[in-house]
Image: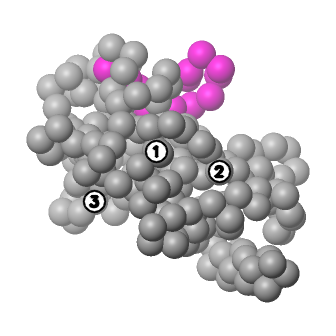
């Protein structure tokens, strides 16, 4: 672990390799698990605002879940998160064949909304936990992502490079440039 500004960062994001392999996992992270995607307070407001524009991209089951539960929910651990369909799929998930995709991201890709998706989804496999004076930035290992680890190793792409756009979105360009310096220093030490 090392400190970067107001973040404590796991060296795993520099040392472990990862590249999503949708052809192997079929977007399992959007349909597996026991909770929706983590959200910030600001993101709950964005979801409320963009829902009417995103709704046409969603499945009937997702629309029903959102209209019953809301565009976001408070999870069992009191965290803000996306609602689920029958405690499984994220309510915003859509399918291209058997591959799960994000309906919000589809609306974004078509220029309908200017918000890509929750930053927690964009950052995955990195999870950020906010504390009162700092944020912990960790690599989240999940067995459904084993193929992504294998592909990342094959392509030699560390986690932090795979999620570069999301890290910049979350922490800014200066923070990311500092992260790259730390990564280079660690590489030179080995």
> On screen, 154 above or below 53?
below
Q: Which residue is mark 2?
A: 139
- At x 76% / y 56%, what residue is drawn? 10
Give the residue at x 63% y 60%.
Answer: 16
Secondary structure, mark 1, is helix
Q: Residues within 10 Å of mark 1 (few under 14, many from 20)?
A: many
Image quadrant containing the C terminus? bottom right
**74 drawn magenta:** yes
Task: Identify the element where label 3 is drawn.
Answer: helix
* Pair 1/2: label in front: 1
Residue 72 in view:
no
Instruction: Give the number of the disc on residue 108.
Output: 3
- N-term mark: 1 or 3: 3
Assess whether residue 109 is covered by the magenta stretch.
no
Q: CA distance from mark 1 to mark 2?
A: 12 Å
Q: Is residue 149 visible?
A: yes
Quarter that holds the N terminus: bottom right
Q: Determine crowd level at label 2: few under 14, some 14-19, many 20+ residues with C-alpha closer than 10 A.
A: many
Give me the residue at 79% from left, 85% from top: 188
Image side of residue 88 versus residue 186, left or right: left
Which x, y percent locates residue 135? 77, 52
Whole-angstrom CA distance, mark 1 to mark 3, is 25 Å
Most frequent secondary structure within the magenta stretch? loop
Occupied quadrant, residue 169 = bottom right
* Residue count near mark 3 (Cα–Cα under 10 Å), binned few <14, some 14–19, many ≥20: some
The front one of 25 and 108 is 25
Residue 31 horizontal/vertical position (percent): 35, 30
Q: Which mark is residue 145?
A: 1
Magenta range is: 70-85
Q: Position of residue 140 (x, y in %)?
A: 62, 44
Horizontally, residue 29 falls left or right of residue 80, namely left
């Amino acid at each position: 672990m090392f400190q970067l500004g107001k973040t404590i960062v796991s060296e795993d994001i520099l040392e472990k390799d990862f590249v999503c392999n949708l052809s192997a996992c079929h977007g399992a992270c959007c349909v597996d698990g026991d909770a929706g995607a983590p959200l910030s307070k600001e993101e709950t407001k964005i979801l409320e605002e963009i829902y009417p524009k995103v709704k046409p991209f969603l499945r009937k089951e997702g629309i029903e879940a959102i209209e019953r539960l809301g565009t976001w929910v408070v999870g069992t651990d009191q965290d803000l998160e996306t609602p689920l369909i029958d405690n499984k799929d994220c309510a915003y998930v859509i399918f291209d064949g058997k591959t799960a995709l994000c309906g919000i991201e589809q609306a974004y890709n078509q220029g309908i909304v200017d918000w890509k998706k929750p930053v927690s989804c964009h950052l995955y496999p990195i999870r950020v936990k906010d504390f009162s004076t700092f944020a912990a930035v960790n690599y989240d290992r999940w067995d459904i992502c084993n193929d992504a680890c294998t592909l990342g190793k094959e392509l030699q792409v560390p986690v932090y490079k795979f999620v570069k756009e999301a890290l910049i979105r979350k922490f800014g360009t200066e923070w990311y440039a500092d992260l790259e310096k730390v990564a280079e220093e660690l590489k030179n030490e080995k």
